[in-house]
Amino acid sequence: MAEMAHGAQHDFWHPPMQTGVPEAANHADLQEACDRCKAEFIVESRYCHNCGTNRPGSIPASGRVESLSLLQLGSLAQHLGLSTGALVAFLLGIFCLLGAIAVGVVYSVRTTVDWQAIQLWRIEWLLAAVAAFLAGCLLKPSR
């Protein structure tokens, strides 16, 4: 076993491979101290750990992916011609359908009792989906 480690001894202390971009070019545009509180930035941080302000030169907040807000949910409902309640019921129905599919994927059948339990869970998820879709139909505005 000891003779296998002889070749690894020479490779262990090599510096990491360069990706083609010098390290100084990656961090040249990033400031080292916060303008507001004069605290030193943590390496690769986007915000000051002391006061929370954005680090100059980091990715702006507008460039990041943001979560679905209520305004976007409202515009989606308007685009589909649904009220907000009907859209929420529709999305809940889709979630329940995915739950019914996931029951078959997650659980495995070994006995007849397992098969019956899985079928019962699928029926429950599908009934919840039907109830959500029915609620969505009842909440849909009339034209």
Image (spheres, rainbow, N blue to C red):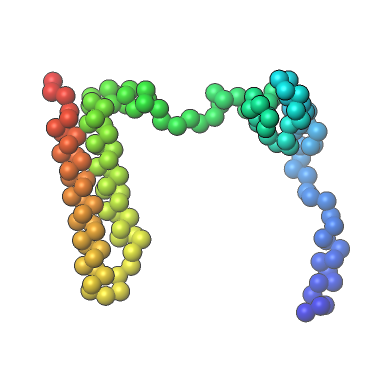
What residue appears at the point 60 percent right and 24 percent down from the top-left corner? Answer: 60
- Residue 116 image position (x, y, % from top left): 21, 67
Pick the quarter of the image with the N terminus: bottom right
What residue appears at the point 24 percent right and 37 percent down from the top-left corner? Answer: 90
Q: Is residue 58 visible?
A: no
Camera-side residue of 14 and 70 = 70
Up the image or down, 85 lies above or below 105; here it is above
Left or right? Give the position of 21 relative to 115.
right
Up the image or down, 6 lies above or below 32; here it is below
Splitting the image into 4 quarters, where does residue 69 fall? Answer: top left
- Residue 24 image position (x, y, % from top left): 81, 33
Camera-side residue of 35 and 24 = 35
Number of marks in the image? 0
Camera-side residue of 14 and 102 = 102
Residue, far bottom: 1
Left or right? Give the position of 77 relative to 56.
left
Pick the quarter of the image with the C terminus: top left
What residue appears at the point 78 percent right and 48 percent down from the top-left corner? Answer: 17
